[in-house]
Image (cartoon, rainbow, N blue to C red):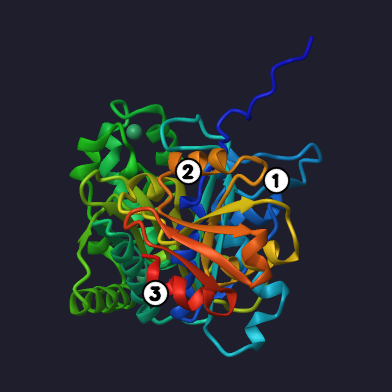
Amino acid sequence: MQSKIQVPRGMHDILGNKFISLFDIMKDIALNYGFTYIETPIIESRNLFERPLGPTSDIVEKEMFSLSSKEYVLRPEGTAPVVRAYIENGLFSLPQPQKLFYFGPMLRKERPQKSRFREHHQFGLEILGSESPIYDAFIVNVLWEIFKVLKIEVIFFVNSIGCQDCRKIIKEKIKNYYKPYLNKVCDDCKRRYKVNPLRLLDCKVDVEIAESAPQIIDFLCEQCQEKFEEFLEILDKIEIPYEIKNNIVRGLDYYNNTVFEVFSEKESLALGGGGRYDNLASFFTKRKVPGVGAALGVERILELWNNYKEEKKVIGVVRIGEVNKFFFEVINLLARGGFRIIESFGKENIKQQLEFLNSLNVRYHIFIGEVESKEEQVVFKDFKTGIYEKIHIKNLIKELTKRVK
Ligand SMILES: [Zn+2]
Ligand SMILES: [Zn+2]
């Protein structure tokens, strides 16, 4: 008996060209804004995540996939690996800041649910080596441009969680506020109260209590306040819509100051988020490496990306008779010329080949036959207009470019 083999729980296959088209759009925008591609391994040391993300963060506490040796885990997020790679490859000796982008799978052992996979893909941007809030806005601006191209309306929810100094005061204020509610809040909150009080604010259960909690930004130190204001002023100037939200705290220890999440306007689905992480590098090096970045959830965005259309010019190719050298010369010309070939060459019968192309509604056909090949010609037919003509391969791409819409 053969046992049934299935994709593992929470994993999924990616089918079709939409995924790679989204990558193309994001990649082109990142490149145009001066980002350089980086790819880090899918397996990293457990230590890379444990302390920087925080031992009480959801990812470290319950979502990491560890390998049998326990020393290594499957990459749960992209920022810590990029900072590790920046230090390990000496990117600090290059002109600063270094702007890096990545696209790849992240693995988290969450309970699988709709649009939440254990393996999901993220597109991420990281800017390392500058403390300036201009770069916080720069990141938000690039995300804004991406969603503009995708025609997905979004809004940014922003907040500042301050520096290590003012956060001490903020945590105390929040704890004081929650103290009288401690027997009412959920178990997670009871635990957060002790280990990670900022996370009380983003509890999905005790929303009402969190809503009246002290506003973090009221207790920022002067320097943190100035940084946040500078960031917001730029967003105002470039007219990117945002709301300040006290419950945007991001779950990870490495963040400081600016944090944000981007939501779709219509469905109010979280599509990504990010923030500043000026102290993340301090876990691996004595060197000071300020940074800011963001990551987008690719699967979520694919779901909302409704205006996706493949723009390629499609040509149906029909084989008449034997395959000779000319036959593949024509095919190569078409592919190099940017046309997408559809065919069923395995069918000997021309009628069957035409039926196949017809079933896919292919409008333009090229017939490659032995007779025409002696004159280095092919037959072109537009099935909509009925136009039927011979074209010399010397002029093939030029002529098709004129005719194929
Ligand atoms: Zn501060
Ligand atoms: Zn709660």
Q: Quadrant of the C terminus?
A: bottom left
Query: Which badge, 3 or 2, is on the more N-terminal residue?
Result: 2
Please report the residue visible at 40 percent of the width from the left and 48 percent of the height from the top: 302
Residue denoted by label 1: 73
Say whether residue 302 is left or right of residue 54.
Answer: left
Kind of residue sitting beneath label 2 = Val
Please report the residue visible at 33 percent of the width from the left and 72 percent of the height from the top: 141
Q: Quadrant of residue 201?
A: top left
Residue 195 numbered mark, or none: 2
Say whether residue 90 is left or right of residue 171.
Answer: right
Residue 324 point in image, percent of width and height: 75, 60
Which of discs 1 and 3 lies nearer the camera? The answer is 3
Identify the element where label 3 is drawn. Answer: helix
Q: Quadrant of residue 144?
A: bottom left
Residue 277 visible in the picture: no
Say whether residue 178 is left or right of residue 316.
Answer: left
What residue occupies the far bottom of the structure in this picture?
Answer: 95
Q: CA distance from mark 3 to mark 2?
A: 67 Å
